[in-house]
Amino acid sequence: MRKYFALFAAAATVLVAAASCAKENLSAAAGEEQMVEMTVIASEKPDANAAEATRTYLDGASVKWSASGEVLSVYQVTNPTGEGEISRKRVDSSEGVTEDSGATMRFSVTFHAVSDASFEYYAVYPRTSLYNTSDTETSVRMNTSATQSPSATSFDPRADLLIAKGIVSDVQPATLNMQFARLVAIGKMTVKNLESDDDITKISFSAKDDGNDVKIAGRTPFNLTTGVPTTSYGSGVAENTLSLDYAGKGIKANTSSGTVAYFTCYPFELSAGDSFTVVVETATHTFTKNVTLTGERMLVFKEGKSSSFSVDMDNITGVEKAVDLPYSCITYAEFHTLGVGDSYSNSQLTKTNGDRWQMYCLDNGSAIRIRKNDSVYNDSYIKLPDYSQDIKTVVVTLTEAASAYTLTLEDNPTSNSGTIATKSVAAGVLTHTFDIASAGVKTAFLRAKGAQASVAKVEVYSGDDTRAEFTAPASVTASLNEDDASVTNSIDVSWANVNEAGSYIVTLTPPSPAEPVSCECYGTSHTFENLLYETSYSVSVVAVPMDPYVKKNSATALAGSPVVTGAEQSKKYIVVFNSTTMQKGVSGASAYTSSWENISGGLTLNLVYFNNNNKGWSFVKCGRSGNASVGTITTTTAIPEAISKVTVTIDAITVSKVNSIKLYVDTVSSFDSVSLQTVNLASIGTGDKEFSVETPTANCYYKLEFDCASGSSNGLVTVSKIVYEE
């Protein structure tokens, strides 16, 4: 079992005694919320070779809590031994308040008061390390980030992992004095004699054990009751390289004393034959040192302990970096080549220009999917490349935006506290531009809040854009959809092809405050559907080059004049009869006693006692020679809209042999409910005959009935069209 570090045991004894007096007051307030204050004390004089102090930063020889931003996650288990109903609750503390110049920090948490029960309490630091907040105390998945931002004197507290030894109590105590253990090791790596006077921007560390990459950070499930991993370190998601961000911190390593790079990592050991690699970057050069251990030399990283070692960069010649291009992008097509699949996982894409994109995303088959980051999952991102110049603009193109949510640029991959910029995503709006020149950042993490994001492309602009402009499309035309005159809110757009164009961005812009609609197209035409009615849209097309690193997007080409959509039309189903719509076998129906189907105008109709002359007519007939008959035409499914009028085109009729023509409307296909409506055709004859429905109702069935007496010949009624109108 893991050793928990005892902190101020005498004080803990006093607090337990005080807690035993709290039961009487607690039972009087049963059902109400009670504030449980938790005090965590940082050791003031840690051993020189130990890291077991409860702290978030080093202050010379002392370890201290930061004055702001510290948050714990506290677990309460009620009736853990099963003598009553077992229940679990996890809450986040308030931000801690430092005491004793940072040696002590006091946190507050709130639980509902419970009497006549026993309790266990556990705690985790930092709150942002939790992968899933619904995990129980026996298997809590926690992240140690491989991307860390240490200071000149301490490691990144967001990469720390601390858990508290469980506290057992027969009442809900007013105070918890918790003893913490560190689950990760602390590295103190001195980098010296770097042959550069430039500031360090990044240091990377990786290791190999028997030739295999060492799991150095990532996600691991821990059992808080025992203080040990439920499986091996990094069994959830493993990271093999630590990346320490020193950009803008003014740190150099060009002397024999060098600089100390602080980091946290999973426990591991290296011995003779094993190796590690250190990569030091400045704005202009990259320096790489590979070290293979020999003899009895060992490098040991143990949980709760610190390990110090040095890396001499003397005689290591730096490789000159390619100057950051003013533009870089990642597309779904490029991401898809990584073979990520439909599970969230780490991936990396290094472009030909040297820019490196890092992602924790999945491939949904059409987009780079960023998971919704919230209190349950907080780990999905697209990391932009590291630039030597400040990023000016980030453009995110989505494949879909079905609902409103928020895109954010953050300064770290797991916390929402370092937000650089946000963009609200409105339904249907696919392109979003972050202007962050004033933020002074050289990289960022793209994340999503409120919903998952389906990303088609991310573009980053830094420095001055010197690329030539691509050729703009010619002959841009736009008009209302000509294929169906009844659709008044659809616009057709076409344009001339541009050689070496990879795609085209087509945008329809309505007057404010309505939002523009856009689409990335790969041909030379596109139809926009379901637009706003009675709205003027200006139409533009931009050509996107195949090689965006050589040329930038073209100037905007406009259609000659805006297109105005029409008024909203009521729904209309127009049914006709011909050899294509008639569905009775190959030869059709040639008898006046047949039953068959006709599919036309979005409806399927069942016809009984109607003839189509083996699909040879563009009409149908009913009525028999020498026999009375009743022909019917019935919708096979309910029509969603509330139909107010049905119009039947009768081309020919023997009026004296037709007893009646009726329309039945009902909510059931058997036409026998209390809602049944019957409409009689008042004037039997030829022409367009209208049946007006007195009470139009959605989701109804419709049956036309032609009651014919015995005739002297067949085909007493000829019908060529039926129209159902909302």
Image (cartoon, helix red, strand yellow):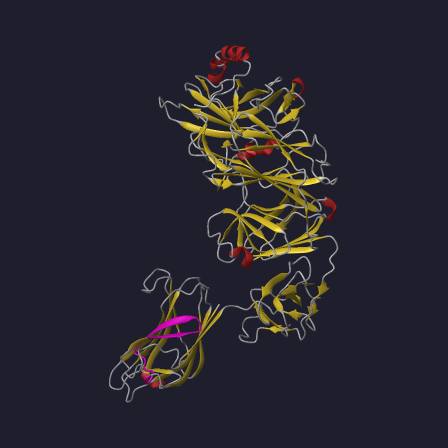
Does residue 144 sit above or below 550 in this rendering?
A: above
Does residue 34 sit above or below 607 in this rendering?
A: above
Question: Left of 178 or right of it: where is 80?
Answer: left
Identify the image quadrant of residue 489.
bottom right
| Residue 232 image position (x, y, % from top left) | 44, 34
Viewer-closest of 540 and 605: 540
Spot the residue most to the left: 626
Viewer-closest of 155 and 405: 155
In magenta stretch: residue 598: yes
Span shown in magenta: 597-614
- Looking at the rendered image, the quarter that the N terminus falls into is top left
Identified at 55% across, 12% down, the residue is 11
| Residue 496 image position (x, y, % from top left) | 64, 75
Report how many numbered discs are placed on residues in the image. Answer: 0
Identified at 68% across, 32% down, the residue is 259
Viewer-closest of 609 and 401: 401
In magenta stretch: residue 610: yes
Does residue 93 sit above or below 559 in this rendering?
A: above
Spot the residue most to the bottom: 712
Question: Left of 300 or right of it: where is 636?
Answer: left
| Residue 521 image position (x, y, % from top left) | 58, 66
* Residue 31 shows in this picture: no
Viewer-closest of 470 and 307: 307
Identify the image quadrant of residue 127.
top right
| Residue 624 image position (x, y, % from top left) | 28, 84
* Residue 678 shows in this picture: yes
Question: Left of 81 or right of it: where is 250?
Answer: right
